């Protein structure tokens, strides 16, 4: 049983670092030139736009003195004519490229037509075929890296957003704590006022004269009115403290949830970093 558990853990560990292999196959595929050999490769996560943009940069690098032929799209193919790709051959070739999109990956098919026919067909020089396969594979690896780099950027942005959310929560929590402290200080002051007025009321029985025409009120009545006002303010301060304490409790719960989210997102970033590092 222990051996089985160990095996499962090892498989899980290795699986987390396993990469989808980038493999170029030579297959007979339909094209505008008929069914001919294509250098076909599956690239995970990539998009058609990125595939064509990178392919254009790969086969037609910009140069100050060198003028490259143009790439044009005809139906479902991108075509470049009379292009010299020195990593493959010194002879000019016509390059026909197709990209098919599927969930999670794309298929890139490259047809290379030379004077003697399509590279990869029977009779092609093996060193030229090997060079073409390696050239397409290098491109596919770069394309996969580009896709994973974008994924990494997205995951890093998610992590940064979560960390910013946590900082906002912490600032808000600090503000609410200050309001709770202010409410507690106010309660202390008001409680002392209430205590003093209650004590004074117990010991006072004199009358005081207010403005002419207002009649007479006892000091007790005046103090009772002031006491009532102080008690009202005290109740308001307690209510404010209770309100902010509830908000603090809610934010602390949200902080814990956000911290858990950040921890998981950091793991996700590390996972994508490892995937990017292992692409080769």
Image (spheres, rainbow, N blue to C red):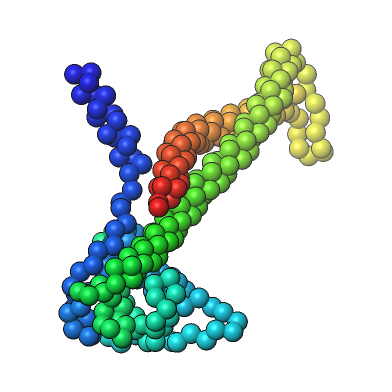
Residue 261 visible? The answer is no
Does residue 112 appear to the left or right of 63 in the view shown? left
Q: Residue at position x 32%, y 57% from top?
A: 22
Q: Where is residue 21 in the image (x, y as percent from the top left)?
A: 30, 53
> From the viewer's perspective, is residue 151 above or below residue 203?
below
> From the viewer's perspective, is residue 110 above or below residue 3?
below
Farthest top residue in view: 203
Q: Residue at position x 71%, y 20% from top?
A: 192
Give 265 or 209, whichever is nearer the viewer.
265
Give 11 or 280, whichever is nearer the viewer.
280
Q: Residue at position x 52%, y 86% from top?
A: 67
- Count up the numbered dots: 0
Give 154 or 129, whichever is nearer the viewer.
129
Q: Quadrant of residue 174?
A: top right
Does residue 137 appear to the left or right of 174 in the view shown? left
Give 11 or 49, whichever is nearer the viewer.
11
Q: Position of residue 161 (x, y in %)?
A: 51, 49
Q: In which quarter of the image is residue 237?
A: top right
> From the viewer's perspective, is residue 208 above or below residue 196?
below
The image quadrant where one finds the N terminus is top left
Q: Where is residue 186 in the image (x, y as percent from the top left)?
A: 69, 29
Q: Position of residue 35 (x, y in %)?
A: 17, 79
Residue 156 visible? The answer is yes
């Amino acid at each position: 049983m222990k051996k089985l558990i160990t095996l499962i853990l090892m498989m899980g560990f290795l699986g987390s670092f396993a990469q989808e292999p980038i493999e170029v196959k030579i297959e007979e595929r339909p094209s505008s030139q008929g069914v001919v050999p294509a250098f076909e490769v599956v690239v995970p996560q990539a998009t058609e736009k990125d595939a064509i943009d990178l392919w254009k940069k790969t086969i037609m690098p910009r140069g100050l003195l060198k003028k490259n032929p143009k790439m044009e799209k005809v139906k479902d193919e991108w075509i470049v004519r009379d292009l010299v790709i020195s990593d493959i051959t010194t002879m000019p070739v016509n390059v026909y490229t197709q990209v098919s999109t599927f969930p999670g990956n794309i298929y890139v098919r490259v047809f290379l037509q030379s004077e003697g026919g399509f590279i990869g067909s029977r009779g092609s020089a093996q060193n030229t075929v090997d060079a073409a396969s390696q050239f397409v594979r290098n491109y596919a690896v770069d394309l996969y890296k580009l896709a994973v780099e974008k994924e990494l950027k997205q995951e890093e942005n998610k992590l940064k957003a979560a960390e910013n959310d946590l900082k906002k929560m912490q600032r808000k929590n600090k503000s609410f704590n200050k309001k709770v402290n202010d409410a507690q200080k106010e309660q202390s002051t008001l409680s002392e006022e209430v205590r003093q007025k209650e004590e004074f009321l117990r010991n006072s029985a004199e009358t005081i004269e207010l403005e002419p025409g207002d009649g007479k009120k006892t000091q007790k009545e005046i103090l009772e009115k002031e006491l009532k006002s102080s008690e009202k303010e005290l109740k308001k301060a307690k209510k404010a403290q209770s309100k902010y304490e509830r908000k603090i409790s809610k934010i602390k719960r949200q902080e814990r949830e956000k911290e858990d989210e950040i921890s998981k997102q950091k793991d996700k970033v590390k996972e994508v970093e490892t995937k990017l590092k292992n692409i080769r």
